[in-house]
Every structure is written in structure tokens, then in C-alpha cells.
Amino acid sequence: MSRTSYEGSDGNGGRPLRDVALIVGGGPGVSSSCARLFAENGIRVAVAARNPDKPVLRELEKSHDVRLFACDASDPDAVEQLFRSVGNDLGAPTLVVHNIDGRMAEIFRKGITEADPARVLETLRNSAFSAFLVGQQAARRMLETGPGPDGARGTIIFTNASAALKGFPKSGAFAMACHAKTGLAQSMARELMPEGIHVVNVPIDGAIGWTQADGTRAHWLAGQAVDDNMLDPDRIAETYLQLHRQHRSTWAFEVVLRPWTEKW
Amino acid sequence: MSRTSYEGSDGNGGRPLRDVALIVGGGPGVSSSCARLFAENGIRVAVAARNPDKPVLRELEKSHDVRLFACDASDPDAVEQLFRSVGNDLGAPTLVVHNIDGRMAEIFRKGITEADPARVLETLRNSAFSAFLVGQQAARRMLETGPGPDGARGTIIFTNASAALKGFPKSGAFAMACHAKTGLAQSMARELMPEGIHVVNVPIDGAIGWTQADGTRAHWLAGQAVDDNMLDPDRIAETYLQLHRQHRSTWAFEVVLRPWTEKW
Amino acid sequence: MSRTSYEGSDGNGGRPLRDVALIVGGGPGVSSSCARLFAENGIRVAVAARNPDKPVLRELEKSHDVRLFACDASDPDAVEQLFRSVGNDLGAPTLVVHNIDGRMAEIFRKGITEADPARVLETLRNSAFSAFLVGQQAARRMLETGPGPDGARGTIIFTNASAALKGFPKSGAFAMACHAKTGLAQSMARELMPEGIHVVNVPIDGAIGWTQADGTRAHWLAGQAVDDNMLDPDRIAETYLQLHRQHRSTWAFEVVLRPWTEKW
Amino acid sequence: MSRTSYEGSDGNGGRPLRDVALIVGGGPGVSSSCARLFAENGIRVAVAARNPDKPVLRELEKSHDVRLFACDASDPDAVEQLFRSVGNDLGAPTLVVHNIDGRMAEIFRKGITEADPARVLETLRNSAFSAFLVGQQAARRMLETGPGPDGARGTIIFTNASAALKGFPKSGAFAMACHAKTGLAQSMARELMPEGIHVVNVPIDGAIGWTQADGTRAHWLAGQAVDDNMLDPDRIAETYLQLHRQHRSTWAFEVVLRPWTEKW
């Protein structure tokens, strides 16, 4: 069994023989790590991205049989169509990860007087509103499908950011979007947990590292004594899988992840 | 009167002789109470509403010389124009209250699967995005104007709701909007307090009462022993005025107001 | 004066003709400012301190007719006796301020491995446990006395610190004590607000300034451009009086106060 | 591989060949589940309890080679001695769980005016102060021992309760103790994470179930359709083990666990 597999030989925690994961947002970090780990643990995986034609995604398609879908997750019709397509292709998702933070160069670290209103609204749409759309479709499908053998219908995970925990200066638009996502997740958790749907908010409180071309880990400051001062997306994915596998008698709603060196 | 007295005979806490308040949102509750109280304390008052032609506002115009402005606060150009008009008419605002919660019948108490996406986006625009627009313009004007004698440039108050404190079930869209407003307010406070601008978030955690046609107070449950189990908008306005008059050495950022009988 | 005016000519917000305040903790900062302001607003004032024989307290006795009581507020019998004595002398308190933070040189800014357990326990006793003792006696007396004309029985205010908001490094014992005080205050608020007792937690998030011998204000860093970068205890006292005068339809439970220059 | 084992064949996540766990508090719920699961995953386990002579503990001694120690965890000398004894017997602990909540019949669900001060202080001692003592010794030993191959020195987990999240009415003393524990944990986390020690606060927000004599699960309300509406201590233990195995690049500080049916 691979090192990323951390369950018994049933590989699936008593869930329906075929778990289906849908990851919305297709970057090289958390989304790719999730796709890989989920697939290695016997889950069929779909990834939706505005542009699914990135090399990193095409590679996942080949290596892990990940299905790719083009989708603008801020468009209600597109999100509805996405869930229909995934359902037809793999079956209704039992694990949905919303992995878009909507950070835009145009509004990031911009003072309140500098931020362009059009970009602020776009950020709200791409992050909070798309989280709503994805959460709504996920809830609908899971409620239709009925519970698995352990009583749970599925898991909806919202990847979030430090700005969900604290509104930093020069971060008004991003703080709005991240706080909104937390509010949505909380409301959905209180509404859907009694229906057997596990809703989780995961604020990532720190920079996410990755493996560089030369095989070493990217780290926060070159020349630092340690190279593990950024979050490892593979470890984030492990936490997501553990959250999906938690029994409904013992669910976590919010897990903040941060590196050991982070100030908070 | 000794220096510890906090309502000196100037009635204005050492601020420029003429404070100017702009209240965005024109309902019969908090907005009207603020307009009345501020005017009675020597502040020149403008109220902006989608429809300023309501009887309650026209009455304030007559009784308290309140200036009325028509404004769709979710439209960037309209908000910019509003601040220009108020500035020309009364001078740059030193006290701005954003008093729109964006609650809509169509999304209120709707389960996550029932809420109409178009209305959810409208709620985000009317509440969080309009708060951004108003906050941005307020910050710009206050930064341009320069500090008053006590060093402070002005006060920006965001009226918020219980859903800012907790995402309740069947309240996803509203929780998003209210949490977003909190995130914005926090970020603005951290950014603008060192510039001498007092930013405040006031979640109103309970139902707001009012004086009924027969002169009695509306209360939460007919037949209850007490008639003060809803928040009094006049008392909310008092808190707002006290917050505006706090010295910058001793500022509050968040004040949650609730009735004594409220469960929380 | 109109009904919106919040400081009628009776100077006492409709409460019993003679409000009685008991301030537990007798330093030259918040306690003294409260004693002065309360007395100047027609409230009879008692101050309890381990050592009431400090010059600053003796001066208040002379200038503002403040009654002084010796009391170790971490001793259950002493606290019970204190309330009996104040009751006999001035009447049952309607406004009680717990103003002891228990900070000790021995545990302050000590790493977790360095702090002396005996001092840690002493800190818990002096701060959290004494807050419980004072809160318990205050609740008992207020419940016995019956409500005033506005329905409220009185106000209990806990002065708290930054460490109530966040557990800082090298601050374990102090964070314990401050968090404990918040937990107590919250529980008491939920229990006693429906009985007409206003319970408030006031974390002071910053250094408190004072007037120096030469008449200038103490400030955080000598040579800074501004001298109002520390909280003014007179302003803190103003907030306390405003909180005491809030109507029970519109109560605040927690107010964090900080200077405009504070990082948070 | 047993079902409780969820890691690769190294069974130990790259840590020193022999992890040593010390569980302070010896009930039949979380402590026993932790002892069993940790032992089954190759960790040497010590349990400290006031009375280690309970049948449930003696059984663990036999079945899982768990070492038992008598210790009053609110006594500084006893706690120091405990860590010395465990160190001599099994080696310095790399995983320490503080599992005492200090709930006492005498103060639980007692109104603020009813609680006996002596019991309130005892609760503070047994819960918050003992958490400090155990945390201090754990930190000392881990700092002395030096890091494992993955850079981390060890994990300190504080089991906490709903009263850490919210001060409920008639729960003042317990709210004090639980909030204090959170404050301590936060301070220790900020201080010790950069030293490679993972500090975690786990508020258990709900009733904990157990297996009854007849082999069925205890549940909250007899006659309910479901029997998994209480937290499963075996599942809590799984989360603890996962937290211990998190890489220091990706640590969680706080995980609130609750059943799917819980109101919050």
C-alpha cells in the first residue's frame, strides 16, 4: 500500500464501493494533491477548472485517470451543468472540494481607497458566490442520492485563507470574500450535518509550498535553516481525506492549518 | 464642568464645529433614529435611500432639516456621486453609517437548496458590496479632509446582524453577506484607525422594535409581560453617537447589541 | 429635552435616585477614573483594595466622598463581608466593577517552562477566582434588591486584557486567567441578563496611559509624534458609565477598547 | 493490519522508533480509547490517574501493556514526579494528552449564586491549573529531548469541552476552567510550535458515547432512530493520532469535534 494510503484494506471507510470526488479549482497545489491522493485511495476524481487544458491537469488525467471539466464556477448554469456531467460520467459526487480563493493581483494588498470596485465584485463572485453555487449543487445531489452504509451522504470542503480568520489591512475585498465563505460554510454545516452531510471550512493560514523543478521544496525565505516553513499541499490533502472519512458521530467543522513557524 | 465630563457644553466632543453625518439606508428604524439624534446633537445630517420619497424621510426633512438623496448604494458611480453631492451640500461627512442589511424575502430562511442564485448575488451586492463602496468613498473623503482638533478624521459605522456572528441554518446567503461585512469592517479598521478614522462593526443581535400607531412599543410576542424585549432603535442611535464621540486613544471596534431577553 | 436625549436632567437614566457603585481593585488608573466620574455623575462610590491606604485613594475619599474598604478579593469570606459593609454603608451596589487583572511580575512574559506554578495558581486566584467571588456577591445583592424603574437591577463590569482575546507566547498563566474571566462573564451574562442584570466584559487591548507629574500624558514611546497612543483611563470610565446607562432593550455584552495606533 | 491502524508499514510516521504517549486522566472514555489505539499503533503508553486501580485501567495494563501511574495532576510535585517516572520507565513522552475536565457534580449546572466557592476553586485547580502543570512538564521534557527525524519534538493535546467555546448559563465555574484551558493552549501553541512542539486544543462539543454492557452503543435519547448521536471515543482517539502524525509544515491548532445531530 502506498504511503499516502492510511486506511485498512477496504480502502474506503465503509462508504459506497465507489466514492466520487469533485474538486472545483484546478491549480498545481491543493487541487492537484487532492486529486492524486483521492485517486490513490480508490476514489474516482473529477477536477473542474476554467481552463482544464493545463499541463498539470493533463498529467493527472493520464497518471490517475482524473476526469477534467471546463467550468466557470461563478456562473449558476455552468455549475449546474458541471454536476450533471460529473454525475453522468462518474456518479453523484460524495466528496466536493471548493478550492478557489478568488485572490486577484488587482485587489490583493491594495488599500481600501485604491481597490477597483469592479474587481472587488469579481472577487466576491469568484470566491464566495461560486462557493455558494458549488455548495448548493453538492447539497442537492447528496440529498437526492441517499446515505451510505455509515449514514453519511458525503462531505463538502471549503478551502479558505487567513483572511477568513482576520481582516488584515489592505485586504478588504479579500477579507470580505473569505469571511463570506466562512459564513456560508457555517450555515450549511448547521443545516446539512443533521441530514448526514459533513460540511468543513479549512482556512489555510500560511503560504503553501510545492516541489520545485530541481526536486527541492519551495520555502518561504531562501537561505533559511529549514525548508518546511510552508504548508505542504500533500499534507493538506491528507487532512481532507481524513475529514471525509470521519464518522458522523465525531465530525470537525473547522480546521485551520498552518506551518510551525507561522506567526498568528 | 470637569475634564472627565464627556458631554461638554460644545455638544460636539471637540470636533469641528460642524459634524456632517451621512446615513446610507433610509428605513423607519435605525436610520431614522440616527438622523433624529444626530441632528438634535448639532450634526448636519444627510440620508441616502433608493427611494427618498417615503413619508418617514420627508418628515425628517421637515422636522430636522435632514437632506435626502436618492442612491442605489450597490452602484459604484451612484455612490461616488452621492458623496460628491453631500460634500457640496453639507461638507465632507465625518460620520458615515452603512445601514443596509440586504435581507430579501426571497432568500431569507431559505434552505441552501432552495435559494435562487440570482437573489443570493443580489444580496451580496446590496449588503457587502455596497458596504465596500460606501466605506471606500467615506475613507477617501476623510483622508482628504484632514483631522479635527482631537486628531480624528471621522467615524464609519457598519450596522450588521446576528448572521455576522453565526451562520444559522437556512441562512446561507445572508450569513455570507453579514460575514463579508464583518471582514470588510475589520480590514478597514486595521488599515484606517492609524490614519485617525474610527471604523466600527455593530451586529444587532435581535429584533428591532418601534413605536406603533397607538403609541405603544412593538414587542416580540404579544401578551408577554414586558414590552422592551426588542432593541430600541433610539438606543442603538445613542450607542452610535457615543462611538462617534469616543476619543481615538480609546476606540471600540465592535459592539454587539441585544435585548436582555435574547437567547445567544 | 427630547426623549432621544440620553442624559436627562436627573443625571441618572431613570434609575433609583441613588445608584451605588462598588469598584474592586484600587489602582491609580481605571479604578480611580471610574470612582471620580461615577461620583461626579451622582453615584455613591465605594472602592475596595487590598491596601486602601494609598495616597491616590485617600485623595478620592476627600475630593469625591469615596468610601474605602480593605479587602482581599480572592478570599470568599472577605468578599462576602465587603458586600455586607458596602450595603450597610451606602446601600446595595447597582454597579460593580471588577478591576483586578492579577498580572504579576513573576509570571508576566515568562515562558511556559519558566513560570513558577505557585505564582500561576496565585494569578488564577487573584484574577479569575476573585472575579467569580465578586460576580457572585454582586448577583446575589442585585437579585435581592429588585429592579429599578427601567426594569434593570444593575450592571457588573469585568475589566479584562488583551490576553482574553488571544493567548500570546510567554503568557500562558495570564492567558488562562483572562480567558477564564471571559468565560465567567459570558456565562453570567447569559444567565443574568434575563434577570435584568447587565454583565459586561471589557478587554482593554493596549497600554493604559496616565497623567504624569508634569501634567503631560504618559505615552507609549518617548519622542513619538503623538501623545495619545495609550488608552486614557478617563475615557475607559466614560464607556463604563455609558454601559451602565444602556437600556436593557439594547445591551452590549463585550466591548474591546484599544488606541488608534494599536496593532491587533 | 488492524482497522485502527491507518498508516503505512513503518507504523510511526518517521518518528523515533519508539513514540511514548502519556495520557493524564484515566476514564473509560477518551483516555481508554486513546491508550488502546496508541498502543495498537506501536506507541508505548502510560496512563496517569488519581486512582489507577480501576478495572478499566487494569484491563488496559493486561491487554495493551499500558503502564499505570497514580498522580494528583493538580499537585506540582506530583506532576513533576510523574514525568520523571514515565521517563525512567518508557522514555520521555512524545505525545501528551491532558484529559481532565474537572467537571464536578457540585458546580455543574449550578446558578452563579448557588455555586460553592471552594468547589469553584477546586474545579479551576483540577482542570486549568493541572493542564498548566502537565503542559509545563511536557514542554520541558520535549525541549530537552531534541527533535525527531521530521524536526518535530512532540505533541501536547488538551481535551476540552463545549464550555470552552461558549459560556453557558448556570455554568460559570466550568466556563472559567474550559476557557482558561483554551487560553493556555493558545499561548503554548504560539510559544512552542516554533520549537517543534505541536500543541492542540480539542473542544468536544457534545456528549461522549460508549459501548454498553449489552454491546450496543449508548446514545443520547433512548428510542431515537439513530444510535450514533453521541461522540465515539474511539473516533476521538483517531483524530488525536492523526493530529500527532501531522507534519509540522501543516499543523492544526484547534479541532472542535461534535456529532452530526448536535445543535450549535
Image (tube, coloured by chain):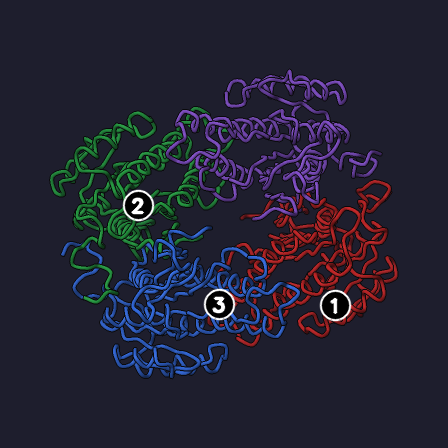
Chain colours: A purple, B green, C blue, D red
Spatial CA distance of label 3 from label 1 is 30 Å
| Residue B155: assigned label | 2
| Residue B57: assigned label | none
Q: Is residue B209 above or below residue A183?
A: below
Q: Are marks 3 and 2 on the same chain?
A: no
In the image, taking residue C193 as reference, residue C129 lies left or right, namely right
Indicate which label's residue lies in the foreground, 3 or 1: 1
What secondary structure is found at the residue carrying circle 3? loop
Percent coordinates x, y for residue B11 in the rendering:
18, 55
Counting residues from the start of the chain, the first of labels 3 and 1 encountered is 1
What secondary structure is found at the residue carrying circle 2? strand
In contact (CB < 8 Å): disc 1 and disc 2: no
Percent coordinates x, y for residue C52 in the rendering:
39, 82
| Residue D49: assigned label | 1
State which chain disc 2 sits on: B
State which chain disc 3 sits on: D
For label 3, the crowd category at 10 Å Cα-Cα, with few meaning under 14, some 14 to 19 and many 20 or more, is: some
In the image, taking residue A211 as reference, residue D253 lies left or right, namely left
How many discs mark residues in the rendered view? 3
Three-letter code, disc 2? Thr
